Image (cartoon, grey):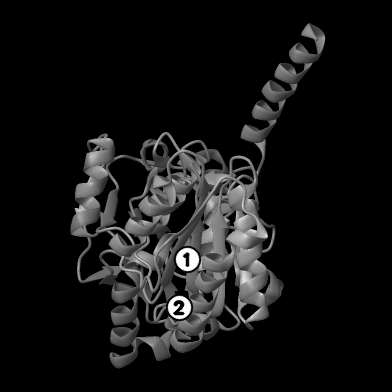
Amino acid sequence: MTAVLFSEIANIFIFSKLHKGFKMEPVKVTDNIYWVGAVDYDIRDFHGYLTPRGSTYNAYLVVNGDVVTLIDTVKHGLEDELLSRVAKIVDPSKITQVVSNHAEMDHSGGLPVIMKRIGLEKPVYASSMGVKNLFGQFHYAGMNLQTVPEKLDLGGEDMVFLETRMIHWPDSMFSFLPSQGVLFSQDGFGMHLAAPERFDDEVDEKVWGPLALNYFANILTPYTVQIGKLLEKVAADGLLAQIKIVCPDHGFVWRKNPGRIVELYSRWVQQKPERKAVIVFDTMWHSTEYMARELTDYLACQGIETRYHNLKNTHRSVATTDCFEAAAILIGSPTINNQMFPSVADFLTYVKSLKFKNKIGAAFGSHGWSGEGAKLVQAELKTMGFEVPSDEVRIQWVPQEKDLGPLKALGQTVAEAVKKLS
């Protein structure tokens, strides 16, 4: 065992040394714009959101003669990967300025290390809230933080900026190069996927489509009003028609058909429910599970597309993605110590923060000595603003066929409400 452990430690050390020596390849986006980010194949949890296929932290280099601009950086610990890609294009010390579109740590965590490498005196441009955010995170760290001007000279072509507050942080902004029609959209239009491909036309929509929806549902849903207004504004100002390439901070660069991802966002911000119900539950001794199965079958027989998620083996963010497009969410919980089941409480807390609209809610659960679990779920669904067309259904002890009348009535009520809403 000791020998194996020593071998593993040695391998990690050797890999770490080799990794620092790797010369990662940049990817050309246009004649003078390069992707120089980092690929994180191993991340599986992104602040509570499951990332089963990893992620990317995209950064971009714009080279115009002696003026070299770095747009966004990477998570702390991946600085060498970014700098090694830059070194394939120019000496990193030749970077003259940095633009920070979004100060969240997965895009700015590497900024202090990178600035120390390229020169702390060089300007780091951000929105006014971005400067405040970066100061709060790094306490300047000797950096030359500046609020972006109306236009920034990139060496013969100007970059303009559009504040996008609360899409999805107060500091967020878009950067745009009108001369090339290239939009740097920070977390907008992104997805979590670690892959060697960099562009949308290299991967089929059947692959990236569900990942883009998963990203929107779990991260951007609370900001649908702001996103909708932004899309209307850029369309009215004529900016949308000028965009030829979209460069987000996660996922693919949209070069073949950037209009497609914009089209999907325009649809998703409306939160129009489909003829679909999602059943999410946990169970102690299978009684609540039995109720969930009965509801699933009953709703399906009513012509409602139905999804079934047991929180014992389904991550909250996976169930949430199904819930995003559904008209109804039915939550099942047993009672434990006069409370709802912990995993159900966790799921409701997570979904509550996403501020879903146009949803029907229903609660159910089995119980033993007391039945507060389903009651508490019902109350929370009302607090979340869901339409709740029926009282919760509680069955004491192990359900039998003779006990299922109220459960079937609940299914009937939900099915009718779904058909009406969707």
The secondary structure type at the circle numbered 1 is helix
In the picture, the disc for residue 217 is 1
Task: Report the front residue among 401 and 252.
Answer: 401
Q: Within 10 angstroms of label 1, few (less than 14), some, or many (20 or more) residues?
A: many
Q: Is residue 131 above or below residue 67?
A: above
Look at 50% across and 84% down and name the residue there.
416
In the picture, the disc for residue 134 is none
The answer to whether residue 26 is seen in the rendering is no
Q: Residue 317 location, x and y as percent?
A: 53, 55
| Residue at the farthest front position | 402
Q: Residue 112 location, x and y as percent?
A: 36, 38
Give yes or no for contact between labels 2 and 1 (Cβ–Cβ under 8 Å).
yes
Q: Is residue 101 above or below residue 259?
A: above
Cα gap from disc 2 to disc 1, whole angstroms: 9 Å
Q: Which residue is mark 2?
A: 268
Q: Residue 405 location, x and y as percent?
A: 56, 68
